[in-house]
Amino acid sequence: MKPAPFDYLRAASAEEALATLAEHGDEARILAGGQSLMPMLNMRLLQPRIIVDVSAIAELRKIDARDGHLAVGASVTQSGLMASPGLATRSPLLASALPWVGHFQTRNRGTVCGSVAHADPSAEIPLCLVALEGEVVLRSTRRRRTVAAETFFIGPLTTVRNPDEMIESVRFRLPKPGAGYAFREVAMRHGDFAITACVAVVDASGIRLAVGGVADRPVAKNWPLLKDDALDDALNAFAWELGGDDDQHATARYRRDLVRRVGRLVIEEARSCQA
Amino acid sequence: MPSLNAQAKHPVSITLNGRTRMGHASPRMLLSDFLRHELGAHGTKVGCEHGVCGACTIRLDEVAARACLTLAVQADGHRVDTVEGLAPEGRMTALQDAFNRHHALQCGFCTAGILMSLSDYLERVPKPTETELRDMLSGHLCRCTGYAGIVRAVMDVTGQTSGNADAEDASGRKEPVHV
């Protein structure tokens, strides 16, 4: 398996990368860590004319906590974010979910923004971004715009990003006082794509449950502080609403059952660790 | 900076196991193929070519990475370490020696990648628990050993079990957990 031929540009600045995107549109692809894009190229599912490598751009390698968000730049790797100081307090959810992203060897190069750009429906980082009501900052030569995570993902490997835009950063909301967070996933082996992954955020005002691996994108639902049968009923309705399909890994019915059971488990865990 | 043309081959210079090596690559050439075909460094193996099997794992600027998910032109000017560089004096490292004693390989196809992962991982986590180790090993496929020998070798070399593989077997080792 070898990629089809392409030109290669190692961009020295975001401006240079954006100018190339503006010139080539959807014939260009951004390469950051390559852990999602390179398999797509090797399998020739994508055959861009030019690859724009942004991994060497220092200005995109920033992690900032400000304005109520943890902003992660386009060339920050998953292991770089995992090793960043104070992640457990700045984002307890990411601290517990990142070890489930791929493997040690792929997290070393795979980027946080790259996973969001790739938009696999079962990927952990897009799920966390939706669960935390995060934002995607898109930049082109024309403008910079911010899109809510819940409207950014529109289907499998499909987002609202225009061909001339690149993800400059993604912004995860910082922990809310008094909120508890929990993450769990079920996969064939640790590091495989999730059959189903669930995130719960529980605070005094209610429950937010986000589910990946079932619908064609990560989906979140808000409820008041439901308990007992009312919570089971809500989980059951949500499991049907997500409309998963059978595939080689699991049936839709099994996925619905995971939403009911793992959903319940993460909600209880998030409740028990409310700060 | 001008882009590199798809149809041409471009000079790529890397520091391979401490030595500067130069070759030529078209932009689409994978680092795994560059190492093997252009530089003749055949220690790095090529398996799935989509990042799953781990056979091609090398260290790029000291961190473990998949050579099949890296372009040769991306590695230009960077440091690459492969299995050939582990034992420069011709004597196996303690980790390689433990692999030998604990039968941590059979066909050996996965071994180069696993050794390169471990050489990075054990610098960060000098005494991993078995659970942590098996989590890390989930990034490698070994179809011969069932991973038991690999786990024993690492536990031995990190000073967490006795060095005698046979004695350990006789005492009844734990049921292997699937990674």
Image: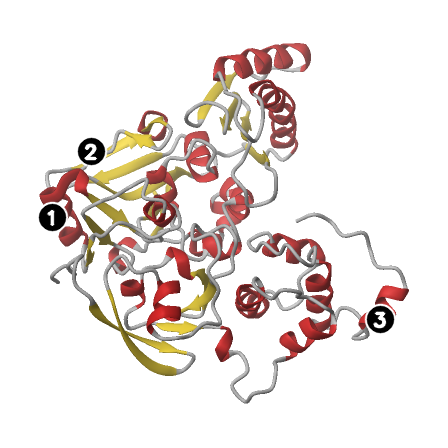
Label 2: state its secondary structure.
loop
Residue where numbered disc 3 is placed? B166
Q: Residues within 10 Å of mark 3 (few under 14, many from 20)?
A: few
Q: Residue at x 52, y 16 (%)?
A: A223
Q: Amino acid at mark 1?
A: Ala
Which label was assigned to residue A162? 2
Q: Is residue B146 left or right of residue A17?
A: right
Circles 3 and 1 on the same chain: no
Q: Is residue B45 positioned above or below A189 on the image?
A: below
Q: Position of residue A2 (x, y in %)?
A: 33, 53
Chain containing mark 2: A
Q: Is residue B135 left or right of residue B37?
A: right
Q: Residues within 10 Å of mark 2 (few under 14, many from 20)?
A: few
Q: Amino acid at mark 2?
A: Asn
Q: Is residue B94 positioned above or below A194 on the image?
A: below
Q: Residues within 10 Å of mark 1 (few under 14, many from 20)?
A: some
Chain containing mark 3: B
Q: Residue at x 42, y 74 (%)?
A: B41
Label 1: state its secondary structure.
helix
